[in-house]
Amino acid sequence: MQIGKLKFKSHAAKKPIAISPTGKFVKTSELSDTPSLAVGSLHALGEDDKVRLAVARYKLEPNFKLALVGAGLMSRDEIIEHMQKRTDFGQLAVNVEMDYCNQLAATLASGAVPKWPIIPKGPLPLPPHWKVVKKCVTVSVPNTALFCENTTDGVTKSFAQYRIKKVHPVFAARGFKVVALTGTDDTRAKFVPIAKGAGTVYLSGIGHGSADRYTGHGNIPILQVGHYDAAEVKGKATHFLSCQTALQLGPDAVKQGSLAYAGYDVNFTFVWDNSSTPIDEVRLFMESDSTFDIAMANGATAKLAYELTYKAFTAAMALVPGTAAAAWLKYDRDHLRLLGKSATTIAPSRKLKICFPFSATAEASLAMAGVAVSE
Amino acid sequence: MAIPNIPERLRRMPLSYDPQRKKFIHFDEIVSGKERIVPLRTLARADLKRLIIERARHDPTPVQQSISGPPLSREQVVAAIENDEPFGRAKVEAEASYLDELLEQIREGLASR
């Protein structure tokens, strides 16, 4: 039987759907013809009227068995009995009928037939109000360039000051974390924990040295063959402006895992400034040597940094032709040694993946709460 | 290639040495064609040392120094070479190596004139 846009079974069409203000049952067909009768909620009826309406509807239903999970089967008459006795189940059944009648009345009044939903084949996009909580995040952490600059010695002080002013800022500008051990802090005790740090990628400085050692404040060794832990140099690039360290310390550092080592295999020799000339001779030595550091900071391979340093010494020689300065610049240039992997580069930062310690239970709880947990 | 421009104040420092005539050869003499370059590799060790000492005596550089050594005046540098001290030996090596390169540049400059 067609009522409005809905097709009813014959017994269903006869069921009352509401109660008029005068207490009479309203049939479905009457409601379809007069939508104003549906105004108001059946839940506003008195309890007696609700039971009366629900029972009237059930009595027109052919006998059936209602299956209740955990309680067994119940016949139509048994349900009516529960309604009339107003047991918990009876009240529930009455309210279910009132809910449905409300819904049916609204549908008839709107004239629209609810349609089956179309189930999407792919995953639904996240509703915009859901907050995506990443399980893992990747952050960028700065790497450390560690400098051991001997500023307490008359010979090395001016070189150290030059390097602090001209070299360290290049590393800082590139994003490296610059740690400079100077003064009485230029010691092995200060050096070791920083050198062993996971993010330390470059070691450098000016200091006294000999074949097997590089020293700091008070000429006390910072790195000495046979007296340091491999972790202090492993995976790092190193350049010391010092005497002779490329003879034994450099090869030993590479053997211990240093990626690259640049140093001199003779005494690094220079001339102090001759005030009677327009050029500051000692500065030529400083600039030439620090070319290696600056090139490394700027991302050059150790090989390219070495080649640029060689060219810097050569260019410096051309500025003071025929002088002792030129002879010593060539001497230092020709005794600069690059050991280890020539393709070594250093980066100002590294990527670090941090994963939150969510347990499976916690994830499930978050999912139930509407929080999407994803990688 | 242009001839390296050796400053006037450095031209008293010889660039080469003729052992047969026991004569130090200077930049101006080479450039003017008055003297020919005697290659340093042909010199005996003693003659090479003689040349480097002569250069050091006329070198206006006030102080030379290794990072891990003491500062040396001109007279001390000369003494270090004469006494065959470590610094003196390094000085001979440095000067000889540099002079080789400088003389080659001068030779090429003269050839291209």
Image (spheres, rainbow, N blue to C red):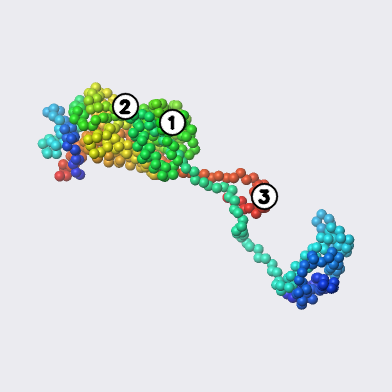
Which numbered mark, 3 or 1, is in the foreground of this view? 1
Please tell me how many numbered marks the rendered image carries: 3
Q: Which chain does the numbered disc 1 sit on?
A: A
Residue A91, x across and y down, in percent: 83, 61
Which mark identifies residue A365? 3
User: For mark 2, what is the residue?
Assistant: B69
Label 1: few (<14), some (14–19) or many (≥20) C-alpha neighbours in 10 Å: some
Q: Does A107 appear above or below B84?
A: below
Contact (Cβ within 8 Å) of mark 3 with mark 1: no
Give me the C-alpha separation between circle 2 and circle 3: 72 Å
Task: Find out whether the residues at labels 2 and 3 contact each other: C-beta distance under 8 Å.
Answer: no
Between B97 and A160, the residue placed more toward the observer is A160
Q: Amino acid at mark 1?
A: Asp
Between the residue at mark 3 and the residue at mark 1, the CA separation in whole angstroms equals 52 Å
Q: Residue at x 61, y 44 (%)?
A: A357
Does residue A84 appear left or right of residue A175 in this picture?
A: right
| Mark 3 and mark 1 on one chain | yes
Check disc 1 and report the residue beneath it. Answer: A185
Tell me the quadrant of the picture where the N terminus of chain A can be found.
Answer: bottom right
Q: Residue at x 77, y 67 (%)?
A: A41
Q: What is the C-alpha distance between the residues marked 2 and 1?
A: 23 Å
In percent of width and height, residue A261 lies at 39, 35
Q: Residue furthest bottom?
A: A33
Asked whether residue A19 appears in the rendered view, the answer is yes
> In the shown orientation, is residue A369 left or right of residue A51?
left
Q: Residues within 10 Å of mark 3 (few under 14, many from 20)?
A: few
Residue A129 in the figure: left or right of residue A341: right
